[in-house]
Image (tube, rainbow, N blue to C red):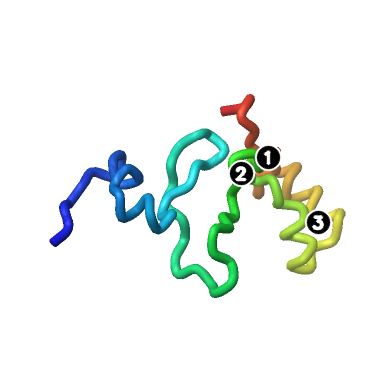
Amino acid sequence: MTPVVEMEDAHRHPHNQARGSFALNCRGEMDPVPAPRLSGREGEWSDPVGRPEPGVGQHTEEVLKEAGFSGEEVDKLIGEGVVEQGEAMTKSKL
């Protein structure tokens, strides 16, 4: 039998602590760690505390170019407000 706990308290449960089911994000908040974890990667977490999360539109230009848009087309889409271009989220911007 397992207790039902609020999400804010789930990271404190001994079972979740033993399994490393939660990790701090760049804002210092506890987030669930994705599952399943692949063999040989135990203890790794893809969002360490020091690494900023991507901001809205941070990778717009890169993604559009990979999709086959020219630099001129990308500039036009951004300039017309069709897509958004932004910056990485940092602790100072939160």
* Marks 1, 3: nearer the viewer: 1
All told, the count of numbered labels is 3
Residue 24 x, y percent position in the rendering: 50, 42
32 or 79, which lies in front? 32
* Residue at x-position 77% and y-position 66%: 66
Find out whether the residues at labels 3 and 2 contact each other: C-beta distance under 8 Å. Answer: no
Mark closest to the chain's N terminus, 3 or 2:
2
Circle 3 residue: 73
Circle 1 residue: 88
Gap in angstroms between the C-alphas marked 2 and 1: 6 Å
Gap in angstroms between the C-alphas marked 1 and 3: 23 Å
* Residue at x-position 13% and y-position 62%: 1
Amino acid tagged 3:
Glu
Amino acid tagged 1:
Ala
Q: Residues within 10 Å of mark 2 (few under 14, many from 20)?
A: some
| Residue 42 in view here | yes
| Residue 56 in view here | no
Check the image and name the residue furthest to the bottom: 39
Provide the secondary structure element on which disc 3 rests.
helix
Q: Could you say which disc has been placed on residue 53 in the image?
A: 2
Task: Decide if residue 48 is on the left or right side of residue 70.
Answer: left
